[in-house]
Every structure is written in C-alpha cells, then in structure tokens.
Amino acid sequence: MSALALRRTFLLAAGAAALLASACASGDGSAPKPVTSSAGATTPAASGPVTVTEPGATPTPAPRGTAVQTPAAAAGPALAAPNVTPRTLTLTGHGVPVVVLDPGHGGDESGAAAYGVIERDSNLDMAQRAATYLRAAGVDVVLTRETEARAAGSGSSFGATRADLQARVSLANQVKGAVFVSLHSNGSGDSSARGVEVYWESRRPWANENLRLAQALLSGVTDSLAAAGYPTRNRGTIDAACWRNNNGRCVGLFVLSPEGTPTSGTAPGATPAAKEATNMPAALVESLFISNAEDASLLRTEAARDAIARGLSSAILRYLGIAG
Ligand SMILES: [Zn+2]
C-alpha cells in the first residue's frame, strides 16, 4: 500500500478522537489526575479537549560529554541537507554508529504528569539508563538533553517549544546520528488507556526503515517489560503522518515529520513546520501511560524503568545489526 493510501486509511479508520487519545502528554479535565503539561496545546477533539505537548522535547544545545567521539561524526560534513537520502541507511558500515536518544520535554514544558510521575523526569531517567546499556555495547550515544532543562531556550511558549524541538533534530543531524529515538510516556483523558505504542513517519524517503525501527522498539520494550515481570499492552506502531487532524489537515509530530509540513504545536491551532528534519531513521516511543494508575506505578518503579531502558537498547542494537 502506498504511503498516501496508508495515511488515508489511517485517517478513515482512526478519527480525531483516537488520534488524540494516543497522544503523548495529553489529557483532559475529566481525567483522573493527569496533569497536563506545560506547553499544552489544546486541540479540539471529537471526544473532548486534549492537551498535547509536543513529543520530542528538550534537547540540549550540545551533547555534553557524550557526543562526538565517533569517527563518522568527526569525519563527515557538518550538516547534511535535509531530505536527502540518508547515509544512515548504511547503518554500520562506517565505524561506530551514533545513537541519538531524545528524552522528551524539559524545563517548564514537563510533559504528562500524574500519580507522582513527571514525564520530563522519567523520560530522562530512562534515556540515561538506555545510554548506559548502549555504550556498554560499543556504540556512541548522544542525548538531546542531559538535565531537566530544555535542549534549547526556556519557557513554555509556543516559540520556545518549537525552538527546543528543532534544536533536537538539528543536533541529531550535526552528530550524524544513525538513528533518532525520542522517549516519551503517554497521557490520555481515558484513564483506562495503557500500554506501549511507537510512532513512525511514512512521509520520509526511508519510511520503511522508520517502520522497522518502530517495530523493533515496540517489541523490545514490551518483551523486556514482560521478562521483568511487568507484562503490558502492545498498542502497536502508528504512522504519525496524521497524528492529529487539525480542521481536516493532517498534522504530524515535529521530530518525525518532513520539513515544511505542518506539525503539532503548543498553541491552539498552531501547526509549526520543522525547518530541518532528521536525516536518519527516527521513531518516538510512548512507554506506558502516565494517566493510568497501574502504568504510572510501573514508571515509579526503578526496575520497570530499567526494563524499558534495556528494551530500548536491545531494540536499537538489533535494528543497527549489532546484536540480536
Ligand atoms: Zn511526551
């Protein structure tokens, strides 16, 4: 099925409510506790307003300490033009690959929050754990942020969030990442919603790689949680090309979208376009629902967060062809 057909099918099948319900850091006033975050963009949804913060938040201007020890990163040109066929399709043939991990949100833009879990902080914890596992396996890792602060800028305004998200993508390109994985946990106005889902983008030249990465991450995280004694719901992979339906227009996720296409914003009706898109396969993982009491209790549990991190790490290594 063509990408266009896929998108069309997705739109018809899903509808705005379903699209929104699965959005990260979303929730509405009727939700049990989910405290929606910061930058909260409100979007009219069929089943009620859902506040949505942009996935892929908070990069740090430069990957402190971690970045750039990779031969590939050191040798190549500074910045590849957006939208070219990514060299990263040859994932491991040029030295040590760089894995870019993007802990979603940061600073005032804290993501979903409920039941004692703040997404900004749990995302960072899981990213740091995953980075440790990946480095132990011999790959380089760059985190788009290493503190609770945003990757770029401050505040929770629409402009600040957009700049923050763009900085994450630009950083991934600068360090010539082989793969970009954004870490999030979900929020929903439906407190019974739980489990793991992974977003990918069909509108990129390497869409099949995006999907393959998303599938690896989904099975990696759910399998690892199950093996640690925390079986959860596998909610599947989701094409983010129509992550939201904004008055009939498809809106994608900033960190996954092609440049120049409408993406989610943090102000009502805003649909900022990325100025630069990732030059490498990318996916956004929503590990469990902060708005669900059981899932939130897992996210408060160090062993469960560590299981998620191990799952992310093993999936990325498997995707890169480094480990089974
Ligand atoms: Zn999030």
Image (cartoon, grey):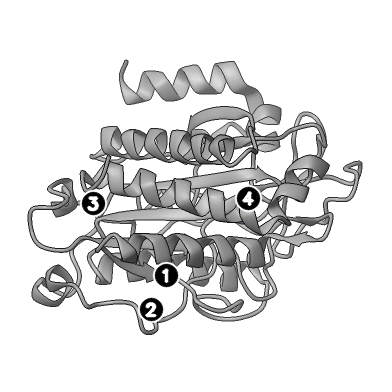
Res. 159 in view = yes
Q: Circle 4 sits on which residue?
A: 304
Does residue 324 appear left or right of residue 13 in this picture? Answer: left
Q: Is residue 85 above or below residue 164?
A: above
* Image spot of residue 40 (x, y percent): 72, 58
Q: Nearer the viewer, mark 1 or mark 4?
A: 4
Pointer 1 with pointer 4, Cβ within 8 A? no
Q: Quadrant of residue 188?
A: top right
Helix, strand or loop under label 2:
loop
The answer to whether the residues at label 2 and label 1 have Cβ atoms under 8 Å apart is yes
Amino acid on which disc 4 is placed: Ala
In this rendering, is residue 146 above or below 221?
below
- Tell me the residue at 42%/70% (across/down): 143
**Mark number displayed over residue 143:** 1
Give me the C-alpha separation between circle 3 and circle 2: 23 Å
Distance between mark 1 and mark 4 Cα atoms: 21 Å
Q: Secondary structure at mark 4?
A: helix
Tell me if the residue at label 2 has its CB under 8 Å from ligand 1: no
Relative horizontal placement of residue 27, taking residue 138 as reference (left or right): right
The mark that comes first in sequence, 2 or 1, is 2
Return the residue at label 3. Answer: 83
- Mark 2–mark 4 Cα distance, whole angstroms, equals 26 Å
The numbered disc on residue 63 is: 2
